[in-house]
Amino acid sequence: MNKFSVIITAGGTSSRYGNKNKLLEHLDERTVIEHTVAAFLEFQEITEIIIPTNNSIKDEIVSLLKDKRIKIVEGGDSRQKSVYNALKYVNNEYVIIHDGARPLIKSGVISQVMDLASLKGAVSVMTKTTDTIKEVAPDGRIIKTIDRSKLYNTQTPQAFKTSLIKEAHEKLKDGNFTDDSSMLEELDIPVYIVNGSYTNIKITTKSDLDFAKLYI
């Protein structure tokens, strides 16, 4: 089995969440970020976890996460810049990139991600879209219903051959991409999907935290 590094993003300010950083909220006995990191610490193939962190919560993150495989580094002022900073510390041939605010990721999905990334070089966890999707004009008029049979919702983790995603970040460093697979899509590099779970929610608002408490 190939060795993997993991980047877990923790550089945001939680501006949409409220006064407290969502990564420091509690689910049962542990914080959100502790749950997220613990899911990856289960795997011996993962030899390092790099966490680009917002300075406002750096001290708390350091005090919570003591495993010798964890390295806390400086985050950027966007998700893309935070990942780019963290990629400089990656030492393995493959890297997994995951949102710190997705604490309910399942070990089976992580395992599938590592297996397919080793074969294909670039993968993203996704779920099939279940809602009916409409295209709407700026004035609020519905233009058409989009065929949802080919539509998927993007999640993390995403995993890549390290050299591939580093090159993408170098070429597109002046962009504003909100996930890493879209950078490879921009460069016409194929990315393959791993079917995810609808419970792998990203905590953005307090209601998301309430759902996470139910799911966990």
Image (spheres, grey):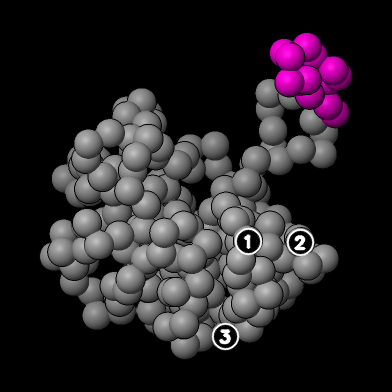
SS type, badge 3 = loop
Q: Is residue 155 left or right of residue 143?
A: left
Where is the C terminus found, in terms of image quarters? top left
Relative image position of residue 203 (x, y in whole percent):
39, 39
SS type, badge 1 = loop
* Residue that carries the numbered disc 3 in the rendered image: 93
**Pointer 3: residues within 10 angstroms few (<14), some, or many (20+)?**
some
Q: Is residue 176 visible?
A: yes
Q: Indicate whether 177 appears above or below 94.
A: above
From which residue to which does the magenta span run? Answer: 135-147
CB under 8 Å between discs 1 and 3: no
Specify whether residue 69 is painted magenta.
Answer: no
CB under 8 Å between discs 1 and 2: yes
Whole-angstrom CA distance, mark 1 to mark 3, is 25 Å
Q: Indicate whether 187 appears above or below 102.
A: below
Q: Nearer the viewer, mark 3 or mark 2?
A: 2
* Residue that carries the numbered disc 2 in the rendered image: 186
**Pointer 1: residues within 10 angstroms few (<14), some, or many (20+)?**
few
Relative image position of residue 140 (x, y in whole percent):
72, 13
Q: Indicate whether 32 appears above or below 149.
A: below
* Residue that carries the numbered disc 1 in the rendered image: 175
The amino acid at mark 1 is: Gly
